[in-house]
């Protein structure tokens, strides 16, 4: 009997995502991949996977899953989602080893927007263009290019959990998350007036309901164009903030179109994209401008932080789990 | 990082983009992960853990001021197109706009050589430059929510070949049986930036024959490599 994770309820919107589909932007294929790569990374290393292994990415609510394997080891990382394993609250920042038939219940987000359910050994799926990440719009990757549906089993590579035990990490090591989202201005900031740029960098912008894996449409004060708001199409990076004719910014994300014809006032730095991914409709963000050199420093610092977490992981024993459970509410808030 | 080489739909700018990409590829810069050529700029994706922006900018500046080296061979594709009818719902409309007959539109459209300026918007979607001025047509007032896969269309001063159903405000002149995007092939994408394209008018009957062959995996488009 082949091992799988059975989806009894996929939550609001759940897809398979890994570190992304790289090398095909030039052919019009967006990267896709986890919106919050930091949480994906941590979920994976907790179960001993490569940091970029595929996991279930769930949105706003997690759903109900069942272990259909002799045993399997899972970790759930991301926003603050209530998790119950066979009805018992699960320890955060720790892997869990499950017996066949164990039920995983992931509720609605208390805070944050996305979570990742990683399984030791990963899912047994066929990569499309080098990745199993799901891109629903063009039907690529995942399970037939679709979001998870009720009853769909996700095949697992391992029949049973690896012999090394569960691991946990010290949440104090997680990247800190306060402050405005940092951006590098440009590449087309010259398409905006000084007043327009000032508005962008001083006002608060609220995540609208029209926000998904392609991008976040933001509500807030109008950003004034200098003249024309059409450019000859060029490439769109993850985190690009484009401002079309209605003067409201759109931050383009994992499933974005690869090219576009609206001027881009700024780009959210790579090190802050995971924070953006945890913001849901109604939440307000501010932007602050940093240099390219500073953005690179932050990227390297984040990589360093993840390495420290990997080195500091400890075997999860009953005592430490109890402590985490007591502290869990504050601690999970800390991931944002 | 984005290197902007102009802000125009212009063959000179697009050739400069292609030359820059070729030179970056030849230089084999450590830490450059991916380059994305567009109409008028080259997006360079890099890993700051392997190269920092100041060094990358130095390298790119050196390449930009140096001569173009080893430009790749040019590929010239002949793409069969069934014009009009169910395959190209806007052929008669476009003819009307320009006071031409449908046959004249077909003759002008299939008489030109196009250059792939950019692949973008959707997987394999090819934006083409080189549409004769006689066919420059403003886009539709009401974009269609979905257009047929493999549509051959025009919008403004541009032309395009699509791969899958996408929303579009461009005018549909015809449909090609050629799969320019096919995940079952080892090389899923047929076209790349800088390729040249000519369209060849085929009958609806011929379309059905070629479509069946393409469905079985035949490329059916002819390719000539020069330079």
Image: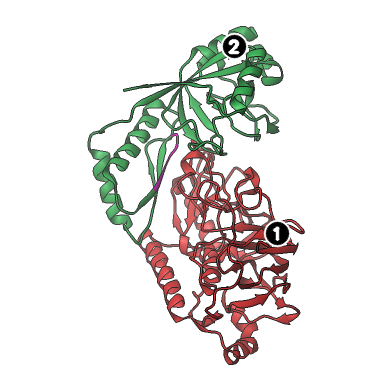
Disc 1 and disc 2 on one polypeptide chain: no
Determine the secondary structure under disc 2.
helix
Q: Which mark is residue A212?
A: none
Inspect this view and state whether residue A320 appears. Answer: yes
Q: Residue pushed farthest front?
A: A1
Q: In terms of depth relative to the viewer, which is nearer, B4 or A108?
A: A108
Quadrant (top left, top right, bottom left, bottom right) of the C terminus of chain B: top left
Determine the secondary structure under disc 1.
strand
Q: Which mark is residue A153?
A: 1
Residue at 54 percent of width and 77 percent of height: A163
**Residues drawn in magenta:** B34-39
Callout 2 crowding tier (Cα within 10 Å): few <14, some 14–19, many ≥20: many
Q: Which mark is residue B105?
A: 2
A238 on left or right of B33? right
Quarter occupied by residue A289: bottom left
B117 on left or right of A13? left
Residue at 52 percent of width and 46 percent of height: A129
Q: Is residue B149 above or below residue A93?
A: above
Q: Which chain letter goes with mark 1?
A: A
Give the chain coloured green.
B
Q: Residue A62: horizontal and vertical position, in percent?
A: 70, 67
Q: Is residue B180 above or below residue B76?
A: below
Q: Residue A118: horizontal and vertical position, in percent?
A: 59, 67
Residue at 71 percent of width and 77 percent of height: A85
User: Is disc 1 in contact with disc 2, using a CB cutoff of under 8 Å?
Assistant: no
Name the tint of chain A in the rendering.
red
Q: Which chain letter goes with mark 2?
A: B
């Amino acid at each position: 009997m082949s091992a799988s994770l059975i989806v009894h309820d996929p939550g609001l919107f759940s897809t398979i995502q890994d570190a992304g589909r790289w090398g095909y932007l030039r052919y019009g294929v967006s990267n896709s991949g986890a919106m919050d790569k930091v949480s994906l990374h941590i979920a994976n290393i907790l179960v001993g996977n490569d940091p970029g292994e595929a996991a279930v990415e769930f949105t706003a609510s997690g759903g109900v899953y069942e272990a259909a394997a002799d045993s399997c080891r899972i970790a759930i990382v991301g926003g603050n989602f209530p998790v119950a394993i066979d009805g018992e609250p699960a320890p955060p920042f720790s892997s869990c080893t499950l017996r066949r038939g164990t039920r995983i219940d992931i509720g609605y987000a208390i805070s944050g927007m996305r979570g990742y359910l990683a399984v030791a050994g990963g899912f047994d799926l066929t990569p499309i263009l080098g990745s199993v990440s799901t891109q629903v719009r063009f039907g690529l990757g995942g399970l037939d290019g679709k979001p998870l549906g009720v009853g769909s089993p996700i095949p697992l590579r391992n029949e049973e959990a690896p012999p090394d035990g569960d691991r946990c990490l010290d949440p104090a090591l997680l990247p800190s998350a306060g402050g405005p989202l940092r951006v590098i201005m440009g590449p087309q900031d010259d398409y905006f007036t000084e007043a327009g740029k000032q508005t962008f960098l001083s006002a608060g912008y609220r995540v609208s309901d029209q926000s998904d894996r392609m991008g976040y449409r933001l509500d807030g004060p109008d950003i004034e164009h200098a003249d024309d708001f059409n450019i000859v199409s060029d490439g769109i990076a993850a985190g690009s903030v484009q401002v079309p004719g209605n003067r409201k910014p759109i931050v383009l994300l994992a499933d974005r179109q690869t090219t576009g014809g609206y001027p881009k006032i700024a780009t959210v730095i790579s090190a802050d994209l995971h924070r953006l991914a945890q913001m849901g409709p109604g939440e307000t963000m501010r932007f602050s401008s940093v240099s390219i050199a500073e953005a690179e420093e932050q990227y390297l610092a984040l990589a360093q932080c993840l390495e420290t977490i990997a080195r500091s992981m400890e075997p999860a024993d009953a005592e430490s789990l109890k402590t985490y459970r007591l502290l869990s509410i504050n601690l999970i808030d800390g991931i944002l | 990082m984005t290197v902007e080489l102009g802000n125009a739909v212009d063959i000179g700018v697009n050739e400069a983009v292609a030359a820059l990409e070729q030179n970056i590829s030849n230089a084999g810069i450590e830490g450059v992960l991916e380059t994305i050529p567009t109409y008028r700029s080259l997006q360079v994706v890099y890993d700051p853990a392997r190269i920092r922006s100041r060094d990358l900018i130095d390298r790119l500046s050196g390449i930009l001021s140096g001569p173009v080296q080893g430009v790749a061979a040019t590929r010239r594709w002949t793409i069969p197109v069934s014009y009009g009818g169910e395959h190209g719902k806007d052929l008669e409309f476009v003819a009307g706009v320009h006071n031409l007959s449908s046959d004249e539109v077909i003759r002008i459209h299939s008489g030109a050589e196009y250059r792939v300026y950019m692949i973008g918007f959707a997987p394999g979607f090819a934006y083409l430059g080189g549409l004769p001025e006689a066919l420059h047509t403003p886009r539709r007032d009401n974009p269609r929510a979905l257009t047929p896969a493999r549509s051959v269309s025009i919008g403004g001063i541009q032309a395009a070949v699509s791969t899958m159903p996408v929303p579009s405000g461009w005018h549909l002149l015809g449909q090609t049986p050629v799969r320019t995007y096919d995940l079952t092939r080892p090389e899923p994408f047929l076209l790349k930036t800088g390729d040249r394209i000519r369209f060849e008018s085929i009958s609806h009957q011929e379309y059905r024959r070629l479509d069946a062959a393409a469905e079985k995996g035949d490329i059916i488009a002819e390719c000539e490599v020069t330079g």
